Image (cartoon, helix red, strand yellow):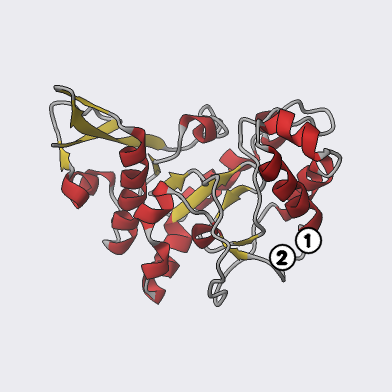
Amino acid sequence: MLTLLSPAKKINEEGQDLDNCSLPIFVEDAEKLIKSLRKYSPKKLSELMKLSDSLSELNVNRYEDWEADHSQKVKPAALNFNGEVYAGLNAISFSKKEKETAQKNLRILSGLYGILKPFDLIHPYRLEMGTRLSVGKTNNLYQFWGDKIVDEINLNLSTQKENVIVNLASNEYFKSVNKKKLDAIIVTPVFKDFSNGQYKTVMVYAKKARGMMAGYIIKNEIEKAAELVAFDNAGYCYNKEASTENEIVFYRG
């Protein structure tokens, strides 16, 4: 069973422990993207990514500082990303054993790096998967990555006890996985809160719940999808009637 997450737009700039970390598998591909991104002025980057002037300047500088050897100015991906999902994951709290489990069973989809282990060392960056960045003969990142992401996922699944993907990624990022070639059953946890007389997905809460679910899987060494229904963090409870074979629904409130 392999769990998938999306990255976060915000980056944690504070220093982190770099011991026992790994390197991204697709650094050469990331370097190709960086070379294309370095051609953009702050103004053009702002238009491409719909960023503010300050964020455009920041990311132009990040692309210039990016180095292929990943020996300096790098941090583990799960500690580098800073958003609701990663607050829920709380990777900083992982024990050595939990860190090893996460390296085997958790993957982060990435516009720049394709796919990451949680403790792969990465440079700070901003490149969402839906960005229409032209590189060579490809018009966007979905075309650029092609089947590399799904092939890597299938390779990772070959070491798991169940051929199951726990999809905790957003639609934008999960779209980068070629479902036709995916050798797995897809299980998607859905988190809904009671609001205005009905249960619905409140994105800020759902994002944090996705991170909590990923952390729950790691800390409890869950290897089978059937065990996910026991998740009860932050007041969420499994709702059998609202769930289907491939969608596990949790209600709160």
Specify the farthest residue to the top: 197
**Residue drawn at 16 percent across, 46 percent down:** 235
**Residue drawn at 43 percent across, 61 percent down:** 102
Q: Is mark 1 on a helix, strand or loop?
A: loop
Q: To which quarter of the image does residue 44 belong?
A: top right
Which kind of residue does numbered mark 2 sit on? His
Q: Residues within 10 Å of mark 1 (few under 14, many from 20)?
A: some
Q: Residues within 10 Å of mark 2 (few under 14, many from 20)?
A: some
Left-right relation of 226 to 92: left
Left-right relation of 27 to 193: right
Q: Is residue 121 above or below residue 1?
A: below
Q: In this view, does 198 lie above or below 161?
A: above
Label 1 sits on residue: 67
Q: In this view, does 24 lie above or below 136?
A: below
In contact (CB < 8 Å): disc 2 and disc 1: yes
- Name the spot of residue 8 as percent of width and height, x first: 51, 46
Q: Which of 16 and 96 is in front in this view?
A: 16
- Location of the C terminus by quadrant is top left
**Residue drawn at 77 percent across, 52 percent down:** 61
Q: To which quarter of the image does residue 138 belong?
A: top right
Query: Is residue 64 visible in this depiction of the protein?
Result: yes
- Name the spot of residue 130 as percent of width and height, x first: 61, 30
Mark count:
2
Label 2 sits on residue: 70
Q: Which of 13 and 92 is in front in this view?
A: 13
**Residue drawn at 65 percent across, 35 percent down:** 51
Query: Is residue 231 visible in this depiction of the protein?
Result: no
> In the image, which disc is placed on residue 198?
none
- For the residues labelled 2 and 1, the Cα–Cα distance comes to 6 Å
Which kind of residue does numbered mark 1 sit on? Glu
Q: Which of 232 and 3 is in front in this view?
A: 232
